[in-house]
Image (cartoon, grey):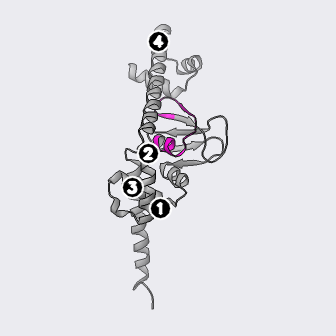
């Protein structure tokens, strides 16, 4: 006796589970959850250095390094360590920070982003409470806001430097400006378009 009446049922169930996981993944990645605030909440004593465009550099949760090798992209919720080569999303960050399974981390973040706690089992609900008590601490929100403000200041400063250089030198030579101001060509292209 088989559990399923037709072999195609197994494929159908696997497909529907895969679609559900995929939908939850995209819902979490499109939510207003902050990977920076999650990192601050789970890894308290780490150094964070803000850059422009909501990019931050910090310590790696997976290996010891002194040079802040992890690049956090607040907008995409993706992090990459340039030291050990690990790349991770907000989901993997929660999974490893709480030492739970990937599915549990995904379900917890999905429940938070949809405000639907009914999908969580008892164990997941305990982890949910633990995680979001940390995440919603006022000090963690304040730290995130402080870093976001610094990132915005750096962006405005760089924009002004590019603008002043272009005005004073009457030049749109991207390579020359990039070399002179020690910044990436892509920023200069973007800002030249916005000034025109």
Q: Are marks 2 and 3 in contact (CB under 8 Å)?
A: no
Q: Position of residue 66 (x, y in %)?
A: 67, 36
Give the mark nearer the N terminus: 4 vs 2.
Answer: 2
Crowd rating for badge 1 (residues with CA inside 10 Å; few <14, some 14–19, many 20+): some
- Using the numbered discs, state the Cα–Cα distance from disc 4 to disc 2 in whole angstroms: 41 Å
The residue where tag 1 is placed is 103
Comparing 190 with 74, the one in front is 74
The residue where tag 4 is placed is 164
Image-based side of 152 in relation to 177, left or right: left
Q: Position of residue 165 (x, y in %)?
A: 50, 12
Q: Which SS class for mark 2?
A: helix
Give the mark nearer the N terminus: 1 vs 2.
Answer: 1
The residue where tag 3 is placed is 110
- Using the numbered discs, state the Cα–Cα distance from disc 3 to disc 4 in whole angstroms: 45 Å
Name which residue lies at 42% across and 54% down. Answer: 129
Viewer-nearest of discs 3 and 4 = 3
The residue where tag 2 is placed is 135
- Using the numbered discs, state the Cα–Cα distance from disc 3 to disc 1 in whole angstroms: 10 Å
């Amino acid at each position: 006796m088989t559990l399923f009446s037709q072999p195609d049922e197994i494929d159908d169930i696997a497909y529907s589970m895969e679609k559900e996981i995929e939908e939850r993944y995209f819902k979490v990645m499109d939510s207003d959850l902050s990977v920076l605030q999650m990192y601050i909440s789970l890894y308290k004593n780490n150094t964070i250095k803000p850059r422009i465009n909501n990019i931050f550099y910090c310590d790696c949760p997976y290996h010891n390094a002194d040079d802040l090798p992890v690049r956090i992209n607040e907008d995409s919720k993706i992090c990459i360590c340039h030291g050990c080569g690990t790349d991770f999303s907000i989901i993997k960050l929660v999974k490893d920070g709480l030492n739970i399974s990937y599915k549990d981390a995904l379900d917890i973040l999905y429940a938070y982003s949809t405000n639907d706690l009914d999908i969580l089992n008892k164990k997941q609900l305990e982890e949910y409470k633990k995680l979001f008590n940390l995440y919603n601490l006022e000090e963690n929100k304040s730290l995130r806001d402080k870093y976001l403000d610094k990132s915005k200041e750096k962006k405005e400063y760089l924009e002004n430097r590019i603008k002043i250089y272009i005005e004073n030198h009457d030049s749109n030579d991207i390579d020359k400006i990039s070399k002179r101001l020690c910044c990436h060509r892509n920023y200069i292209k973007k800002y030249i378009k916005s000034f025109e």
